[in-house]
Amino acid sequence: MAGNHDHGRRGANSRALTIALILTGGFMLAEVIGGILTGSLALISDAAHMFTDTAGLAIALAAIRIAQRPADSRRSFGYQRFEILAAAFNALLLFGVGFYILYEGYQRFFQPVEVQSLAMTGIAVLGLVVNFVSARLLAGGKETSLNMRGAYLEVWSDMLGSLGVILAGIVIYFTGWAWVDPIVAVAIGLWVLPRTWTLLKETMNVLLEGVPGGVDFDAIARTVESTPGVAELHDLHVWSLTSDQTSLSAHIVLIEGADGDAVRTLVATDLASRLHIEHVTIQTEREDCRGSGSTVYHSHKSGPA
């Protein structure tokens, strides 16, 4: 039953992402063409921002589909890390787009370009509608999937960019202040770059097998060390294959007379119930196996986490 439920949920999420991707990607192209025809850099910069959403939706959709492929003799962990590789590539590409928007905005302060404000505003209004529809489609899966939640937030945040372009179009129409267009464009660029940097840092941390964000390494150590039957902990490693799957491996030295299978079960149960880490590999030892090349974790027991 659980397997069927998960399959149904992934199918629903996949359908919602596919529709949102078609809507967002199609309108992104329309914004690029509209920005060129109307002379609006703000519209082009919003299209660049919408490109981040399109890429994010594509990554989320690919992650759902590729993650279902089984592990094989060449990739024993399966294909789930494709999401991280695609996100890292996306972040590098977006840096180039963001800096280009900032450069063009700077140039337009000194060489203003006539902007067709009514057409610019109309296109942005349509973009706002597309983003709203996409957000509604993705809202159903955001509570059960981090992948879907990220896609939902991408689309939701893009609505702010569309609102910025609409505001610029209205101001230019009534005042003729063409300089408002590059200001909005630069503002959108400055908003995209920090998000891109955060995305790059998170993907690099996963690729370097760093401790996932929000995971308390010391709390994990205390939880393991406080388990009955554990005398000592070493070679503790915590990493993630994808953005939402934390893995752990550790060596524990048993107290004399302790049952290894029972202790491993207790450790795994505690990690799952108290810290929500379910993919664990525990090696039990009667004597400390550490050699000169071993990674040693020095902790101070302070009771359960």
Image (tube, grey):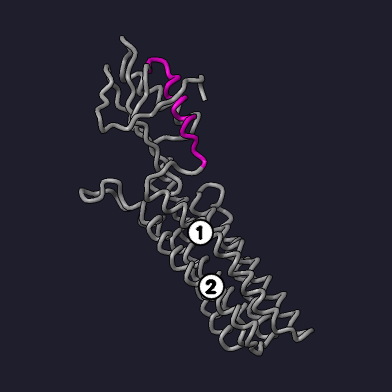
In magenta, the rendered stretch is 214-230
- Location of residue 131 with respect to 207 vertically, above or below: below
Residue for badge 2:
48
Residue occupying the point 58% across, 89% down: 37
* Image mark for residue 230: none
- x and y percentages locating residue 298 in the rendered image: 40, 26
* Residue 228 falls left or right of residue 30: left
Label 1: which secondary element: helix
User: Could you classify mark 1 by the number of other residues whose Cα lies within 10 Å: few (under 14), some (14-19), or many (20 or more)?
Assistant: some
Q: Earlier in the sequence, mark 1 or mark 2?
A: 2
- Location of residue 21 with respect to 299 vertically, above or below: below
Residue occupying the point 26% across, 33% down: 293
Residue occupying the point 74% across, 79% down: 170
Residue for badge 1:
197
Does the magenta segment cover residue 21?
A: no
Identify residue type, mark 2.
Answer: Ala
Gap between marks 1 and 2 measured at Cα: 16 Å
> Could you tell me how many numbered marks the image carries?
2
Identify residue type, mark 1.
Answer: Trp
- x and y percentages locating residue 121 in the rendered image: 68, 80
- x and y percentages locating residue 266 in the rendered image: 40, 22
